[in-house]
Amino acid sequence: MADAQTNTNPVKARPAPEQQMRVVIVGHVDHGKSTLVGRLFHDTGQLPDGKLEAIEEMCRRRGMPFEWAFLMDSLKAERDQGITIDTSQIWFRHDAREYVLIDAPGHREFIRNMVTGASNADAALLMIDADQGVRRQSRHHMYLLQLLGVREVAVAVNKMDLVDYDEDRFRAIETEYRQYLEGIGITPRQIIPVSAREGDNVATASEKMDWYKGPTILETLPQFEHPASAAEQPLRLPLQDVYKFDDRRILAGRIESGTLNIGDELVFSPSNRTARIESIESWNTDGAATSAHAGESVGITLDEQIFVERGEIASHEMGAPIESDVFHARLFWLAETPLEIGTACELKIGPKRVDAVVEQIERVIDIDALTDHDATRVARDEIADVVIRTSQLVAFDEHDNLPRTGRLIIVDKHLTLGGGVISLGIYPDQRQAVTVRGTNLTEVDHRVAPARRIARNRHRPGVLWFTGLSGAGKSTLAMALEQRLFDKGYQVYVLDGDNVRTGLNANLGFSPEDRAENIRRVGEVAALLADAGLIVITAFISPYRADRDRAREAAGDAFHEVFIDADVATCESRDPKGLYKRARAGDIKEFTGISAPYEAPVSPDIGVDTSGRGVEECVDELVAYVTENFSNTR
Amino acid sequence: MDRLDILESRSVYILREAYACARPLAMLWSIGKDSNVVLWLARKAFFGKVPFPVVQLDTGMELDEVYAYRDQYTKEWDLDLIVIDCPPESEMDPSLPPMTRSAARKSAGLGNLLDDGGYKGIFVGIRRDEEATRAKERVFSPRATDGAWEFRDQPAEFWDQFTTDTPENAHLRIHPLLHWTEIDVWRYTQRENIPVNPLYFSQDGKRYRSLGEKNITAPINSDAATIDEIIEELETTREPERAGRLMDNEAEDSFERLRTSGYM
């Protein structure tokens, strides 16, 4: 669809300019970030005409000595207060490469502006005042940069003129800070002693620090490298929109990683619908593309008109993203109001928006000492590990594998409250559990109506889903209840954990995905047996709400959640299988209640507290529940 | 992907985010080189169509060539054009310096557009490299009804997650070109063969580097008569782009005052 009018006079294209390198300048307030930028411009002869005089005039009017920072601090309020309020950018050319220098504020009040500036950077230059040494924002900024995904780092120890260009002072700061960077997994390209005000080691080597043999700031910039292309990684195309401007139905989005080709079969997560790419659409390009790669904003059409919507992630079937409604995130919190357990919020993962609850605050990280502590809330500017539960299944990746689809932001109405990087940890990928493999399936109806089974058995069918910690009494109560009900004439059967694992689920191990599959199968079998008219009692820890919800979905109204309730201490003192002892010794990893979470039912159909009570007493309660709820006359 | 591909892809992403989340939308079309590129990028993003109105804030003071360009391409590109007549200078804040007061007419025209149109998002073709306060802008910049820019309290914006919701009665300024430079605009114009207003090319040793109203904009000395020559000139110049925009330097903060009260 090239526009004829505009293409009648093609011009010879100039060689494509190199990609710009975006460098953010960060560090504690007043450690000289804006000054460095001004100095760099001046010493390389790149100040715009009249700028020097304009700055001199501004300083004269304020009765203050010449201030390089006025080059970047363009707002009057910034000049009057002598601090950078918001991030700024300036273009800079050196050695055939173009740099964008991003000046980020160092005052702790403006962390969110610093995050804004730094998130677009390819590399970072961190400034430390030689006189003051490593300060809070020296660490905080770097920790945030690491979360934001900036890996290319150099450090300038500034204001060396204030410490008489003393080598020992520089070495002490260098050692301390290098150790900190190591602790968060960053290896700096250089650590450079500098005086931005005097110009030492900025654009020219310092004569006053002949003990330093390394490169200047200007010589360090070319060492920064762009991250490798993500085209070789698994395909991720989060959908931004679906257009129908003409007879084409175009799916639009940006490829965050990987490569797609015409004819590829795509799966859309989490709807799990599939279709093939019929065409790659574009406007005013030379011919139609047959493939597209990471970084490109594309439009595609499909061979089938399946329903997909904004926020779904298109991928290949092999190496599709994770699907879950519960996961871990390492968050940086920017909002004034603290984050608390149970906070309801909205998440954005790429273009996908979903309601969520912060279910757990696992730890708050002390970014100075790199230690962590328990907390019930996360204050502004703190970093914390949390567990998030979404209201529906969402598709994402673990940040360590695919950063661009492994991060989220938390929003409240129009405000961005914080950001975070995602990991799955002990939680299972639920994709397998929700995927229907078969196609061309047609369900057929039974000729025996459920009412006839109820009439013959003289009770209603159902699933009594026991959940609780190991040692809470699930198996014991299940077997005792089965016996009592059978004796009273009920058709009843127990599905028990260890029994099922020797047969139906003998091929499953103990990975998070296998555990989820174990529960899924039990839920389906229980639903089938209930459909056959039986009362089914299941005895599985089934610690995750998502797994139990799926079992409830399989059995529908016949599902009864039974919380067999006893605290960890009680269960551990019973320890019928010796499992707690082994878990405490570290022989069993991820043992529920010890090293893995148990998500108690929110509103169980019945709860049975077994602490300090006999089996018969508890069974009485359960029999009463069954009598009341499974009567054929109800 | 080369540099222009990267810039284009991000701009297209921004345009599509706005179209998905911030409708009804309108685009300010000053008919200069930058907003022509934004218009072009919109056609890229939406496969040849511009699915929202384009708005000219008309002071009646534009150069003739600007009006000619507008009329020709509104037709050829099938644009939904809205022309807003800006209120007269006599209604502007008398405390502003004279040129700045003249420029403020456009903010007032934009205010009228917002009052009448109920737009949630307005595309504006500003760039960070053209002026220092613009360098501090967000891609999606929330504004109060009166258009005021709360530069002390801008929202966080990272990982290409934009502020797409606004409080009642507020709107978003959306800046798809914010990360481009002046040279990028010319290189892209050349690559895509976007029609260029002849005022940008040298005639009798002068050309317009930045197009504004004739009463407050001056041409610069230049012999650049082709895009290649313009790019060559820009690669070596130390003259700021808006040197010909007379209102910028009337006072230290004249442009800042314009912007905080709603100017583009």
Image: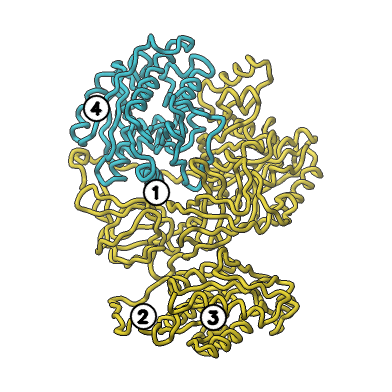
Chain colours: A yellow, B cyan
* Residue type pointed to by label 3: Thr
Residue position marked by numbered label 4 in the rendering? B70
* Residue type pointed to by label 2: Ala
Residue position marked by numbered label 2 in the rendering? A451
Check chain identity for marks 1 and 2: say if they share one. Answer: no
Give the secondary structure at mark 1.
loop
> Where is A341 relative to A105, above or below?
below
Labels 1, 3: front one: 3
Q: Residues within 10 Å of mark 1 (few under 14, many from 20)?
A: few
Q: Are marks 1 and 2 in contact (CB under 8 Å)?
A: no
> Where is B96 relative to A370, above or below?
above
* Residue type pointed to by label 1: Asp
Q: Which mark is residue B2?
A: 1
C-alpha span from label 1 to label 2? 69 Å
| Chain under numbered label 1 | B
Image-quadrant location for residue A459: bottom left
Residue position marked by numbered label 3 in the rendering? A538
| Chain under numbered label 3 | A
The spot of residue A479 in percent (x, y) is 59, 86
C-alpha span from label 2 to label 4? 76 Å
